[in-house]
Image (cartoon, rainbow, N blue to C red):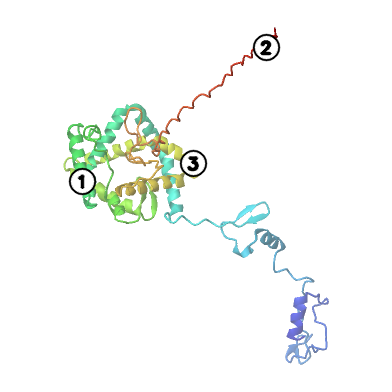
């Protein structure tokens, strides 16, 4: 049998006769004798030898599984393209593709796992301590501690304003620090923001300086202990934390003083934003919600350096955020609350002039016309 005929037989899947010998055709001559082949008695003779071929199945095995073809037709994509993201629902295979991370968060998958781990530890350990902190200490004491730590950061704010070539803001920061350190009992009371000084607190630091000069935030990260940050903020905050004790001098340069103060400051910040953090956890995607709030707040702080304000900024860290009206969220007592959502200042509509009174319609009262009664003629 020639190679062409054998290929035709294989393609058509035709059955061969029992015994496996190929039928004789005009295109395939009979088997030729093979010299040296063993004979029936075990001796080598020169007689012809029939070489049996294996029997073929009546129908060849299909190269494509019908079930796979049906799934391919339903999914709309070849089965070979199905990857690790496939989902099996019953007998159907649904092909899904993982969404790419957002432009500002290339490490989204790693950050989200870090966020879940940190939140689990926070719920089990930090949150109960923060709630006990809020319940055990009166609010004026908690606010006083936050004012104290905010005042300790004023030297860094002063240097940042100098780097931004804002000498006026730098001098105001020096005035705030001097007033609150003396009249405010070491910064426990924020006297400088009240009358007659009117020197509000303005957050600033090296990360803000970099953003002020156009340095982008870089990739977003959620790190254990540090929490939400970006590459620019991580570098700037690290330098600020190292420079602050050096600018303040002793005893803040001693580790036995600096470390407990850092822990107490972080606990106070966590307690101040307990309600806001619980709201974020109730979101459908808490990690994405936290990321968007943080990045928007950071953008608002950079915009404030250029004299611009963003509306609808919900603070998730730090003391006080400026709103569109240049004010901060305040409670009925006039004390600032960093954990309350800031509502944009909406200008009140101008009072419309009162319409002129419409004169009452004049009613015409007709007088009856008295007709003279005609007198009869005499």
| Alpha carbons under labels 2 and 1: distance apart | 104 Å
Task: Return the disc, 3 or 1, that comes first in the chain's sequence.
Answer: 1
In front of the other: 110 or 346: 346
In front of the other: 216 or 252: 216
- Could you say whether the residue bearing mark 3 is in a helix, strand or loop? loop
**Disc 3 versus disc 1: nearer the observer:** 1
Q: Which residue is drawn at 52% across and 56% down?
A: 99
Circle 1 residues within 10 Å: few <14, some 14–19, many ≥20: few
Number of disc labels = 3
Examine the rendered structure and indicate whether residue 279 appears above or below residue 228. Answer: above
| Alpha carbons under labels 2 and 3: distance apart | 99 Å
Q: In this view, does 133 lie to the left or right of 9?
A: left
Measuring from the top left, give residue 62's x and y in whole percent: 72, 68
Measuring from the top left, give residue 254's x and y in whole percent: 19, 42
**Disc 2 versus disc 1: nearer the observer:** 2
Query: Which residue was labeled with disc 1?
Result: 168
In front of the other: 338 or 47: 338
Viewer can see residue 94:
yes
Q: Which residue is drawn at 80% across and 75% down?
A: 14
In front of the other: 292 or 334: 334
Label 3 close to label 1 by CB (< 8 Å): no
Examine the rendered structure and indicate whether residue 318 appears above or below residue 239. Answer: above
Quarter-of-image position of residue 316: top left
Question: In the rendering, which numbered label is found on residue 283?
Answer: 3
Label 2 close to label 1 by CB (< 8 Å): no
């Amino acid at each position: 049998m020639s190679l062409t005929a054998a290929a035709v037989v294989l393609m058509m899947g035709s059955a061969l006769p029992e015994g496996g010998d190929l039928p004789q055709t005009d295109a395939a001559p009979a088997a030729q004798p093979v010299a040296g082949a063993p004979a029936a008695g075990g001796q080598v003779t020169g007689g012809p030898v029939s070489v049996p071929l294996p029997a073929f199945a009546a129908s060849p095995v299909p190269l494509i599984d019908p079930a796979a073809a049906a799934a391919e037709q339903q999914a709309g994509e070849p089965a070979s393209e199905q990857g690790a993201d496939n989902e099996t629902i019953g007998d159907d295979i649904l092909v899904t593709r993982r969404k790419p991370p957002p432009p500002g968060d290339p490490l989204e998958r790693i950050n989200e796992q870090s966020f879940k781990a940190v939140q689990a530890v926070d719920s089990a350990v930090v949150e109960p301590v923060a709630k006990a902190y809020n319940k055990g200490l009166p609010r004026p004491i908690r606010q006083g501690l936050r004012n104290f730590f905010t005042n300790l950061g004023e030297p860094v704010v002063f240097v940042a304003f100098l780097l931004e070539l804002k000498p006026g803001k730098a001098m105001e920061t020096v005035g705030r620090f001097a007033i609150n350190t003396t009249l405010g009992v070491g910064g426990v009371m924020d006297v400088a923001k009240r009358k007659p000084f009117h020197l509000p607190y303005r957050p600033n630091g090296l990360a803000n300086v970099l953003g002020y000069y156009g340095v982008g935030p870089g990739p977003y990260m959620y790190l254990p202990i540090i929490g939400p940050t970006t590459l620019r903020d991580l570098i700037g905050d690290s330098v600020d934390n190292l420079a602050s004790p050096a600018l303040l001098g002793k005893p803040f340069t001693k580790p036995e003083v600096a470390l407990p103060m850092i822990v107490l400051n972080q606990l106070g910040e966590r307690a101040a934003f307990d309600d806001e953090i619980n709201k974020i956890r109730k979101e459908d995607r808490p990690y994405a919600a936290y990321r968007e709030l943080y990045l928007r707040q950071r953008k608002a702080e950079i915009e404030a350096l250029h004299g611009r304000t963003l509306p609808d900024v919900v603070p998730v860290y730090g003391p006080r955020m400026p709103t569109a009206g240049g004010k901060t969220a305040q409670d009925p007592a006039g004390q600032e609350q960093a954990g309350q959502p800031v509502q944009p200042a909406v200008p009140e509509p101008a009072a419309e002039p009162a319409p002129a009174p419409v004169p009452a319609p004049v009613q015409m009262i007709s007088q009856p016309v008295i007709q003279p009664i005609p007198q009869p003629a005499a």
